[in-house]
Amino acid sequence: MSQPVRDDIIMHSDLKTPKSAAVAGIMFSLLMFTIFGLLRRSIPTDPLEPGAWLAADTNSIELALNLVPFAGIAFLWFVGVLRDRLGHQEDRFFATVFIGSAMLFLVMLFTAAAVIGAVMLLASKTEPNELISSGIFRYARSAAFIVNNVYATKMAAVFMVSTSTIVIYTSIAPRWIAYIGYLFALLLLIGSYYIAWSFVILPAWVFLISAHILVDNLRKHGDDIGAR
């Protein structure tokens, strides 16, 4: 007597992560470097500055803000690449912290960009001097600074700590990359408020680990072709 066919058979999808998907992490890093450069040359680092930049050419700021969503998309793709590389080794605890910190980082990044974007929109409809002297501008400027330089960077540090720990326990990347991640995370946790370039620490580390994953994927792909 033949065994009845079970209704709960799991159908495996043919969707697979492309070998070059790690390029997403590199794209995230390059976009964030560009955003940081455009904003740094247009907006002073002091959140209590008088706001004279609103009366100047703001095209660089608008370009930077328009690049933020694309950087967020690339970062999400990078997180997916890491999860795909983990496979069955993924631990629920570290996966929760890893994914949660990544999502919170993006939320904070988008929030800061939205606040600056709202200031830009108001500036385009009112006299710059009138907006600069208002309490709304000072509040929005300070809020964007705090969200980005305190909360977003702290979530970036948590992301690097959790990812570095995963790297050490699963060997999905060399340990020295994890140790650099711990060092960078410590810098963000302790001195992000005082380090003007703290915004680029996470993109720099993502670039490092993405470049390794990309090279490793391409090498394995070459080995597979050579074995056929």
Image: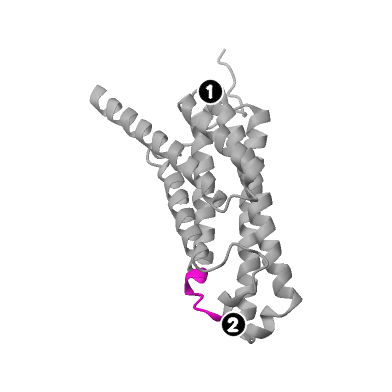
Q: Residue 190 sits in which quadrant?
A: top right
Name above or below for residue 220 compared with residue 189.
above
What x and y, as percent, mark residue 96?
67, 35
Q: Is residue 185 left or right of residue 177?
A: right
Residue situated in front as seen by the camera: 87 or 150:
150
What x and y, as percent, mark residue 200?
51, 49
What residue lies at 53% left-to-right and 45% top-to-bottom? 201
- Note whether residue 141 is visible: yes
What residue lies at 56% left-to-right and 67% top-to-bottom? 43
What residue lies at 62% left-to-right and 28% top-to-bottom? 8
Q: Residue furthest top?
A: 1
- Note whether residue 17 is visible: no
For the residue marked with disc 1, what is the amino acid?
Thr
Q: Is residue 65 left or right of residue 138?
A: left
Q: Main secondary structure of the magenta part?
A: helix
Which is closer to the viewer, label 2 or label 1? 2
